[in-house]
Amino acid sequence: MKLLLVGASGLVGSHVLQRALADERISEVVAPVRRALAEHPKLFAPLVDFDQLPADAPWWQADAVICTLGTTMKLAGSREAFRRVDHDYPLAVAKPARQHGTPTYVLNSATRADAASRFFYNRVKGELERDLAACGFSSLTLVRPGLISGPRQAFRLGERVAEGILKTLGPLLPRSWRINPADNIAQALLEAAIAAQPGVHVVRSDMLV
């Protein structure tokens, strides 16, 4: 199958890319990126500007999209910039992919995504889920991890402290409170894309431990 992966250079996306390139069920990975990726026989990584995506590029037609795009309020610098990366870009990928016949979309979302939430982060994630559901994909899977563990390029003090606490208390905590390893999330995303079950599906954080 042909997979369209966006966010391939991020923590979860890099794990998805590694798994997809090693998976015999995947014949080709298209990973539009802002910075070049290491070459691989199965990989086509066009350089793009996510603010001006090429609407008619032939690589929009795929068997499935996996989207792992995301940032933090600190890195984004403003609510507007955060919303652009975590809502507008994933939706800007979804629309041409669907118009070109791609039937399946799998999103790395967040555990408390809710379009009606009082909290900005959760609300943006929920609004994206809602807007993706309106795009008309025959299969839409929303993977909702909690705190994600794995080596990051940027140091995040708050997440590092929380990760240390949760690792210590992990065996005593409910599964829904435990850390979700990035590779577990990547596996869930990839399997959902390959299975492409009809309808809308949610993968909860307790299923990613």
Image: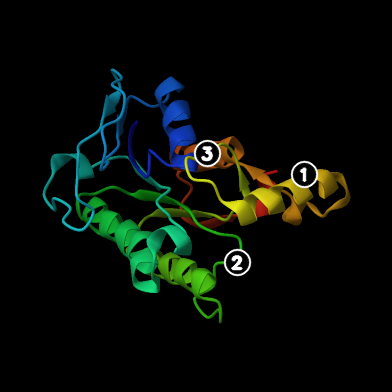
Query: Residue flagged by tag 3: what amino acid is it?
Result: Ala
Nearer the viewer's eye, disc 1 or disc 3? 1
Farthest-out residue, right: 172
Looking at the image, residue 52 sits to the left or right of residue 83; the answer is: left
Residue at 63% in and 56% down: 158
Asked whether the viewer can see residue 146, the reply is no
Nearer the viewer's eye, disc 1 or disc 2? 1
Tag 1 near tag 3, CB within 8 Å: no
Looking at the rendered image, the quarter that the C terminus falls into is top right
* Secondary structure category for the residue under label 1: helix
Residue at 44% in and 21% down: 22
Near mark 1 (Cα within 10 A), the count class, few <14, some 14-19 or many ≥20, is some
Which of marks 3 and 1 precedes in the sequence? 1
Point out residue 141 in the picture as x, y percentages from the top left corner: 49, 53
Residue highlighted by disc 1: 167
Query: Residue flagged by tag 1: what amino acid is it?
Result: Lys
Near mark 3 (Cα within 10 A), the count class, few <14, some 14-19 or many ≥20, is many
Asked whether the viewer can see residue 75, the reply is yes
Residue highlighted by disc 3: 186
* Secondary structure category for the residue under label 2: loop
Residue at 41% in and 32% down: 17
* Secondary structure category for the residue under label 3: helix
* Nearest the eye: 59 or 71: 71
* Nearest the eye: 135 or 154: 154
Farthest-out residue, top: 41
Query: Residue flagged by tag 2: what amino acid is it?
Result: Arg
Near mark 2 (Cα within 10 A), the count class, few <14, some 14-19 or many ≥20, is some
Disc 1/disc 2 C-alpha distance (Å): 21 Å
Which of marks 3 and 2 precedes in the sequence? 2
Residue 112's disc is 2
Tag 2 near tag 3, CB within 8 Å: no
